[in-house]
Amino acid sequence: METQLVISGIIYGLSMGSIYFLLAIGLSLCFGLMRIISLDQLLYYSLGAYLTYTVQVATGQMWTAILVGACVAGAASLLVERIVFRRVYARDITFTMITSFGVLIGGVGTIKYIWGLIPRPAAIPIQAQVVLWGTPVPTYRLIVVALSVLVYLGIALFLNRTITGKAIRAGIEDVDHVEGLGIDVYRLFTVTFVLAGTLSGLAGGLHAPLIMVDPQMGLSALAFVFMVVIIGGLGSIKGTLVSAFLVGQVMSLGSLVYAPLAQMAPFAIMLGILLVRPTGLYGSPLLKR
Amino acid sequence: MLRWWSGILAAFLVVALLRVFMSLPFATEVVIFSIYVMGCNFLLGRVGFISFGQPAYLAVGAYATAFYLFYAGTNPYLGILAGLLAGVAVALLVGPLFVRLRSDYFALVNLALAVIMYYLMEKVLAKFTHGDNGLWFLTRMTATPVVNLTTPAGFFVFAFVVALVLWAFYKYLDETIYGACCLATKINEDKVRFLGYSNFAIRWLAFVIANTTTALAGSLYAVYFGFVSPEITGPHRAADPVVVTILGGVGTLYGPIIGTIVYTGMKDVLSRIIVNWEFFVGFLLVFIMLAGEQGLWGTLEALLRRVRRSGRRAPVPQETG
C-alpha cells in the first residue's frame, strides 16, 4: 500500500513537472533572448486549455483538440508580439513585465467574456491504466511526461543543430554581435516568442483533462511557474527542466506527508536556493539590475 | 512644481469633494486603497522595485489586527497598532533576503510569497484563522474615544487623517537625502556605492517603509469590514496595486489617489454594466505603457502646469465616473 502511494505520487509529480516545464520553457527562452518577462505566456496556456475543451466537445477528438489549442495559442502569441511586444523589446525588464501583465489581464477578461465563469471539464483521451510495480497508473500521465521529454529533446536539437537555433543561442549570449553578423534579430525574437506561446498552449491543452478548465487557471499557475523559473534560473533551458521536475516531485511527495506542504514546499526550496545563489541554479549573473 | 502644502490641500479637497458626491463606502474604499497603493508606488517609482506580492503584506497587517481583535482585545486602535508592528516585523525579516535580488526576481519572489501566505492562512494555520470562513470580529470592537472607529463616518475620518499623514510623510521623504538616495539607487547603484552609501541599507529601509504602509492598509481593511479571510491575499488580486500605480502615474505623489479614484470608479461603474471589467483594465494598462507610461497624474500635471500661470488652482480631476 505504502509503495503504491509513493509510486503514484512520483508519477503525479512527473506529470505536473512536465506541464510546468512546458510553461516555464517559454518564459525562460523569452527572457534569455529578448530580456522580457512574458507574463502573458499564462494567457496562452489558458487559451490552449479552453480551445482544447471546445474542439473536443465539438469533434470528440482529444488529440486533435490539443493540437488545435497549441496552434491557436501560437497564433495569438504572434498577434500579441506584432501589436505589443514589437514596441517594448528595447525597454527595461519591469516595463515589459507590467505590459505583459496588462495583456494577461485583458486576455483573461476576454476568455471570461467568450466562455463564461463556470469551470468546464475536459475528457481524458485515454482511460486505460498501466500497471507499474503493482501500481495502476493512468497512461495519459505517462504520455504527458513522454511528450515533455520529447519537447525538451526537440528544443535542444533545434538550438544545437539548426542555423536559426544557433542564432538564438548566440543571441542569448550577446544580441549585438548577432545583429552585427547581419542576422535579423527581430525575426529571431518573433520565432522565439511564437515557439514559447505554442508550447504554453500545448501545456494548457495537456493540462486540461487533468483539471477543470476555468478562467483563473492562468493566474493560479502563475506563482508555481515562476517558482520553477526562479529555481532553475531565468534563461537556462536545462535549469528549467531540472527545477520543473524538482518542483513537481516536491509538491506531490510533500502532499503525501502533509497536505498543505504541496504549495509551501516549493516556496521553501526557492528561498533556500536564492539565499545561496540569487540567480537560481543555472541562472546567468550576466544581467545586472 | 506645485508647493507641497498646496498639494496636500488639493488632495484634501479632492477627497472632501468625493465625500460630498459619493457614497460613504465608496469614499472609504478609495481612501484605504490609496494607502495600499502608496507603498507600491514608493517601491516602484523611487526604488525601482516592482512587486507583484503586495497582498502578502496586506494580509500580514489584516491578520495581525484580526488576531488581536478576535483573541485578545477589543480596541480597534490597538488592533491597527498590532497590524503596523507586524508589518514592520515581517518587512524587517524578509527584507534582507529579498532586496539582494535583481528587480525581476524580486517581483516574482514577492508573488510567490503572496501565494504562500494564502495557503498558510487557508490551510496550515486553519486552526487559528478558521480557514476560508475567516475571522469575524465586527461585534467585538468597542467604541473608542476621540474618533469612534466602529461607526462608518468615524472610521472614514480616521482613515482619511491617516492617509493625509502618509501623504505628508512621503512628500517629506522625497525632499530628504534619503529620498534622493532611493532615486539614485534606482538609476545607478555603482555611483551610490562610490558616494559611500549602502545600496542594501537604502533598499531595505525602503522595503520596510513601503510594506509597513501596505500592512497599515490591511489593518484598516480589517477594522473597516470587521472580517478577514484568506481572500485578501488571493493570487487573483495580486497585481491590483501595481495596476493602479501605473494608472495614476509611477513615482508621483498624487498618482495613487487619482489612480485609485479612477480604478475604483471604473470597477463600480463597469462591473454594473458588464461582467468583465478586467478586459478594460488590461487594455488600459497596455495602452498607458505604450503611450509613454506617464499615467493619469503625469498627463494631468503637464496640463496643470500649462493652465497655472500664476494663480494657485487646486487640481480637481473630473474623471470620477
Image (cartoon, grey):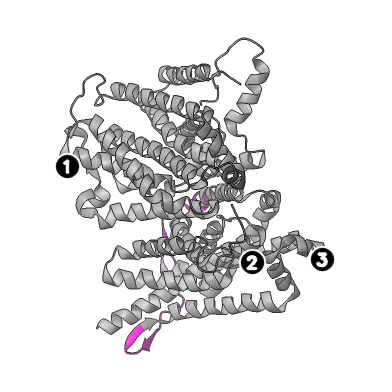
- Which quadrant: the N terminus of chain B? top right
Left or right of residue B206, residue A37 in this image: right
Left or right of residue B221, residue B44 in this image: right
**Tags 1 and 3 both on a single chain:** no
Disc 3 chain ID: A
What amino acid is at disc 1?
Tyr
B23 lies above or below A192 = above
Q: In the image, which disc is placed on residue B71? A: 1
Percent of width and height locating residue A79: 67, 55
Classify 10 Å Cα crowding around label 2: few (below 14), some (14-19), many (20 and above).
Answer: many
Left or right of residue B169, residue A170 in this image: right
| Quadrant assignment, res B138 | top left
What amino acid is at disc 3?
Leu
Disc 1 chain ID: B
Residue located 17% across and 42% down the image? B71
Q: Residue tagged by mark 2?
A: A195
